[in-house]
Image: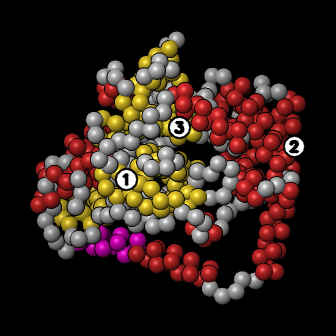
């Protein structure tokens, strides 16, 4: 039904894994039960009443009444560890009302989503009304471009030493105006710019580079009617135009055995975005799956990291596209028998990233799967590969301690993203087990 390795792969970080294992004792659980669909239990915690914890089998969706914002929380992990270790500890029973209520709400949401999707396809579309909506949005986006361009020109004229460049509130206000102008992609871009002065020591150099890429995007978007289909699709998505996902699903699929390499979660204004990178064992291709949910809900990610799935993906249009949709999100996963080794060094990863940037100058993250281990250079953390090449690592204290204990000074398979300045590690191998180093993106 569920294995220890599957539960381990679901842990959002090493601390949650350790806490979940510690709670996986029957003495901590006054109530335990299961049926064919769900595991449930009540666990003693710091609150007045026991926390109510439940897990949907198959998709591993979880819910707990504890205040933790990690998904799954340590209580859900503990419940799954209990089931994986000895299923008889969770007796078959009629689910309590609070389990029934959660399952009913999930079913209701799924039915509403299905009905909405069917309704959107039903009957002929009003072409005139649709054209008017597009025209209104184009006008709003153009207004947003004007606002953004004026802001950038003032910023360059005044210089990066002025408060405008370093004040997060200024960038956030600009982002909100761009959202109002129906350009959420540009809003996300400027919010990232607002974070730079508070995350990087050499932020001025990086901001100049990012401002140049943003200016290129603005000018390219304004010439979109003269562009190739792929370039036009790319710049429109970068600005924030929605993509017809039915058309994406109708495009040519890529079938492979996909290894679920890494997953991160990012929250912006109570919208949680889950980013999952898959690596194709046969094609060597990377694919990015995005799922969204408004807090306190959690994005529904059907495949745990460290697993693999034989399925087909279709890719969004664009330049060197990596975002994809699963043709069948219910495809069954299996625990990966081995960790893929693309045989890529740091030097090879940089060459691949360079080729991608030559095609798509707005790409901000490049996934990787390579063998390496943590080290230091000039007192700063780096990742060193077997060829002696190293790159700066954006490490957190907790990640550093855990990874060093796993590596023991020897290279292990690591998965993460290269942003052009630092490596961000998200998962690592420990023998045949695949651990998440973190889920919440920096």
For the record, the magenta segment spans: 95-106
Q: Is residue 72 left or right of residue 20?
A: right
Residue 429 higher or lower than 250, as above or below: above
Residue 193 higher or lower than 101, as above or below: above
Residue wearing tag 1: 308
In the rendered image, residue 429 lying in the magenta stretch gets the answer: no
How far apart are labels 2 and 1 at the CA level?
48 Å
Q: What is the crowding at mark 2: few (fewer than 14 residues within 10 Å), some, or many (at least 20)? A: few
Q: What is the crowding at mark 1: few (fewer than 14 residues within 10 Å), some, or many (at least 20)? A: many
Q: Nearer the viewer, residue 56 or 407?
A: 407
Residue at 83% from the left image edge and 34% from the top image edge = 155
- In percent of width and height, residue 342 lies at 45, 38
Residue wearing tag 3: 417
In the rendered image, residue 103 lying in the magenta stretch gets the answer: yes
Mark 2 vs mark 3, foreground winner is 3
- In percent of width and height, residue 231 lies at 75, 53
| Residues at circles 2 and 3 in contact by the CB criterion of under 8 Å | no
Mark 3 falls on what kind of element?
A: strand
Residue 353 higher or lower than 407, as above or below: below
Can residue 82 be seen here? yes
- In percent of width and height, residue 293 lies at 51, 60
Residue at 65% from the left image edge and 34% from the top image edge = 354
Residue wearing tag 2: 150
Q: Taken as a whole, is the magenta stretch helix, strand or loop?
A: helix
Mark 2 vs mark 1, foreground winner is 1
| Residues at circles 2 and 1 in contact by the CB criterion of under 8 Å | no
Q: Quadrant of residue 213?
A: top right
How far apart are labels 2 and 3 at the CA level?
33 Å
Q: Earlier in the sequence, mark 2 or mark 3?
A: 2
Mark 2 falls on what kind of element?
A: helix
Q: What is the crowding at mark 3: few (fewer than 14 residues within 10 Å), some, or many (at least 20)? A: some
């Amino acid at each position: 039904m569920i294995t220890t390795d599957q539960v381990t792969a679901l842990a959002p970080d090493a601390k949650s894994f350790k806490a979940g294992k510690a709670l996986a004792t029957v003495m901590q659980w006054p109530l335990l039960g299961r049926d064919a669909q769900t595991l449930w239990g009540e666990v003693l915690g710091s609150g007045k009443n026991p926390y109510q914890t439940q897990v949907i089998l198959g998709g591993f969706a979880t819910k707990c009444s504890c205040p933790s914002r990690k998904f799954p929380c340590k209580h859900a992990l503990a419940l799954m560890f209990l089931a994986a270790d000895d299923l008889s500890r969770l007796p078959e029973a009629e689910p309590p009302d609070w389990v029934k209520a959660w399952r009913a709400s999930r079913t209701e949401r799924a039915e509403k989503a299905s009905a909405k999707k069917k309704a959107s396809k039903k009957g002929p579309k009003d072409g005139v009304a649709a054209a008017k909506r597009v025209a209104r949005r184009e006008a709003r986006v153009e207004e947003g471009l004007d606002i953004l361009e004026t802001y950038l020109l003032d910023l360059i004229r005044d210089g990066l030493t002025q408060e405008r460049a370093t004040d997060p509130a200024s960038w956030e206000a600009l982002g909100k105006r761009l959202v109002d102008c129906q350009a959420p992609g540009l809003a996300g871009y400027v919010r990232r710019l607002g974070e730079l002065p508070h995350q990087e020591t050499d932020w001025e150099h990086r901001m100049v580079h990012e401002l140049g890429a943003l200016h290129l995007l603005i000018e390219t978007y304004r010439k979109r009617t003269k562009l190739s289909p792929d370039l036009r699709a790319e710049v429109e998505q970068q600005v924030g135009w929605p993509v017809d996902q039915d058309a994406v699903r109708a495009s040519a699929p890529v079938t492979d055995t996909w290894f679920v390499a890494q997953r991160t979660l990012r929250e912006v204004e109570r919208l949680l975005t889950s980013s999952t990178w898959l690596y194709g064992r046969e094609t060597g291709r990377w694919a990015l799956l995005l799922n969204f949910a408004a807090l306190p809900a959690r994005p529904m990610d059907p495949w745990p990291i460290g697993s693999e799935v034989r399925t087909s993906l279709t890719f969004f249009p664009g330049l060197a596209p990596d975002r994809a949709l699963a043709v069948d999100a219910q495809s069954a996963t299996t625990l990966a028998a081995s960790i893929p080794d693309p045989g890529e060094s740091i030097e090879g990863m940089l060459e691949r990233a360079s080729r991608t940037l030559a095609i798509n100058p707005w790409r901000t993250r490049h996934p990787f799967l390579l063998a390496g281990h943590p080290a230091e250079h000039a007192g700063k953390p780096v990742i060193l590969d077997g060829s002696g090449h190293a790159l700066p690592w954006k490490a957190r204290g907790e990640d550093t301690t855990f990874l060093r204990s796993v590596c023991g000074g020897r290279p292990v398979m690591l998965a993460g993203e290269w942003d052009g300045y630092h490596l961000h590690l998200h998962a690592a191998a420990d023998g045949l087990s695949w651990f998440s180093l973190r889920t919440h993106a920096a």
